[in-house]
DNA sequence: CTGCGTGCAAATGGTTTGCACTACG
DNA sequence: CGTAGTGCAAACCATTTGCACGCAG
């Protein structure tokens, strides 16, 4: 717990370092499967039974705002959270509500090339993410990298 | 109202044709701005004050299931709906919760080429959609096509 | 006719909010 | 120490559900 690097990350964004923030941030970093706020809250409860759901939501919003995390909308109606690392895309299983990461520098290069050629009038692009919807054949949990 | 083609569409999917279904379907077709269920419900109320919100949800689910509409995830926590036309992508305004369409056959071709070369192990792709997140400079409401 | 579709209202569940208390800097 | 952060519980709001009634086929 209280990994040095997550404390650093909070501090680098000018945020007060609290046990709640460390716990929430590290929970998202550790649990790679795009957890929901509720899942994070329950995961944290093992170590910090006193941290309330309301606080988890507040901390998540704050971390998203500061660019430490990303919100990912799942196929269902709940929000999921993702640690902000290298740019990547998402595979959605249309059966379950599972989300997996997909990253490939080549794809990113192709997209970058395309959008620097095309210019969308009146719109400044901040981020591009691909939702690849389909079905898993296997029940693997590995991060998919090409 | 009760446009002939929407009745046809319902019938072609083997659905009973009811005033509620016609109204909901046509509301999404007419209001191009990816309305929420609530917006659809209020829009419909002008002509059909008696149609309940619960019915709107049920009809929307049914039409999505039958492939007449698509669900679109907005940046906020509400679902939005989109008439199923040609394949297209979405521009999200990160300030407001506005969504606009983006379509370009060239982009679709590029993506198709890419994913037929890459093979994602254990995953069968059903649909691909690009979320392009950024900011509009202008307050235009036109569909963006390249 | 006969069962699927609808209206209504209550229930659900994720997320937000208000406020007194706590602890970070 | 002072103020931003937290815990708690109530409030909120989109969506779902159950059931009696109504209407499309």
Image (cartoon, coloured by chain):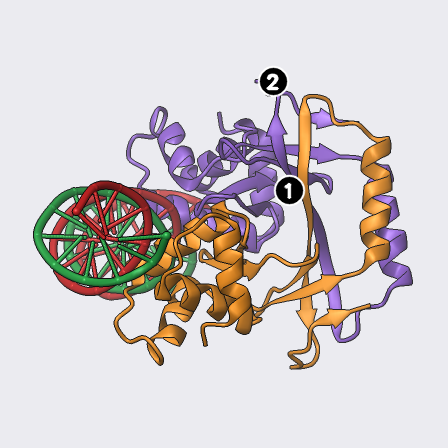
Chain colours: A orange, B purple, C green, D red
Chain of the residue that carries numbered disc 1 in the rendered image: B
Where residue B28 sits: x, y (%)? 52, 34
Q: Mark 2 points at which residue?
A: B138
Q: Residues within 10 Å of mark 2 (few under 14, many from 20)?
A: few
Nearest the eye: A121 or A126: A126
Nearest the eye: A31 or D23: A31
Q: Is residue B98 above or below residue D8?
A: above
Identify the residue shown where x is 79% and y is 74%: B121
Q: In which quarter of the image is the C terminus of chain A?
A: bottom right
The reply to whether label 2 and label 1 mark residues of one chain is yes
Determine the CA span between mark 2 and mark 1: 27 Å
Q: Is residue C15 left or right of residue A131?
A: left
Q: Earlier in the sequence, mark 2 or mark 1?
A: 1
Where is residue B101, by image quadrant? Answer: top right
Instruction: Name the front one of labels 2 and 1.
Output: 2
Where residue A69 sits: x, y (%)? 53, 55
Identify the residue shown where x is 67% and y is 42%: A127
Dot 2: element: loop
Q: Name the residue under label 1.
A: B84
Q: Residues within 10 Å of mark 1 (few under 14, many from 20)?
A: some
Where residue A36 sits: x, y (%)? 45, 64
Dot 1: element: loop
Q: Is residue B108 above or below residue B49?
A: below
Nearest the eye: B23 or B57: B57
Nearest the eye: A63 or A35: A63
Where is residue C22, by image quadrant? Answer: bottom left
Q: In this view, does A114 lie to the left or right of B52?
A: right
Q: Can residue B122 be seen in this view?
A: yes
**Could you say which disc has been placed on residue A69 in the image?**
none
């Amino acid at each position: 717990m209280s990994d040095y690097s997550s404390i650093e990350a909070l501090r680098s964004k000018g945020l007060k370092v609290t046990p709640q923030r460390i716990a929430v941030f590290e929970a998202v970093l550790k649990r790679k499967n795009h957890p929901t706020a509720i899942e994070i809250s329950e995961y944290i409860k093992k170590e910090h039974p006193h941290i309330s759901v309301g606080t988890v939501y507040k901390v998540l919003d704050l971390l998203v705002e500061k660019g430490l995390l990303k919100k990912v909308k799942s196929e269902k109606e709940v929000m999921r959270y993702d640690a902000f690392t290298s740019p990547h895309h998402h595979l959605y299983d249309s059966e379950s509500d599972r989300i997996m990461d997909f990253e490939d520098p080549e794809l990113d290069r192709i997209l970058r090339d395309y959008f620097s050629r095309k210019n969308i009038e009146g719109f400044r692009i901040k981020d591009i993410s691909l939702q690849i919807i389909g079905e898993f054949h296997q029940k693997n949990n590995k991060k998919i990298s090409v």
